[in-house]
Image (cartoon, rainbow, N blue to C red):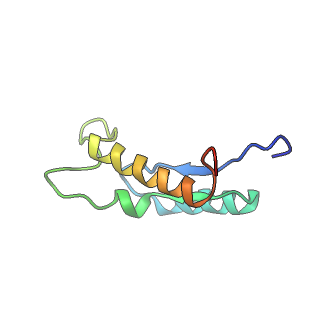
Amino acid sequence: REQGAAFALLHAPFPRYNRAVEARYAAMAEHLGVPHLKLIDLLAVAPPDDPNYFPVNRHFTPRGNRLIAETLARFLDRAGLLPGN
């Protein structure tokens, strides 16, 4: 911060949607005074034929990656954390 760097916390939840883990990340971000992007509700919903996670290895599908990227870009823009903001 002293050098002008910005910091934000992003927690990409595992498919179990563990809200207790998400709450700990939110508390940590609040304690540090940094913006925190919650994705748990966004990633919890998906059509059966286009999931956010692959069922075998639990990695993000193209849909899941796109949702995260688009949401992260809007979050960073609103928070003024993109270069030029």
In this rendering, is residue 44 above or below 63? below
Q: Is 63 left or right of 22, judged from the image as shown?
A: left
At a point 40% along the width and 57% down the height, the residue shown is 17
* Location of residue 15 in the rendering, given as x and y in whole percent from the top left corner: 36, 51
Lateral position of residue 45 relative to residue 8, left or right: left
Residue under the point 43% across and 55% down: 71
Rendering coords of residue 45 (x, y %): 29, 61
Based on the displayed image, in which of its 4 quarters is residue 54 positioned? top left
Q: Residue at x 24, y 58 (%)?
A: 46
Q: Residue furthest top?
A: 57
Q: Position of residue 24 (x, y in %)?
A: 61, 59
Going by the image, does 84 lie left or right of 1?
left
- Among all residues in the image, which is located at the extreme front? 84
Q: Is residue 45 above or below residue 76?
A: below
14, 30: nearer the viewer: 30
Q: Residue at x 55, y 55 (%)?
A: 77
Q: Residue furthest left?
A: 49
Q: Does 60 appear above or below 47? A: above
- The number of numbered discs placed on residues in the rendered structure image is 0
Confirm whether residue 60 shows in the render: yes
Q: Nearer the viewer, residue 2 or 12?
A: 2
Is residue 21 visible to the viewer in this orientation of the structure?
Answer: no
* Snapshot quadrant of residue 65: top left
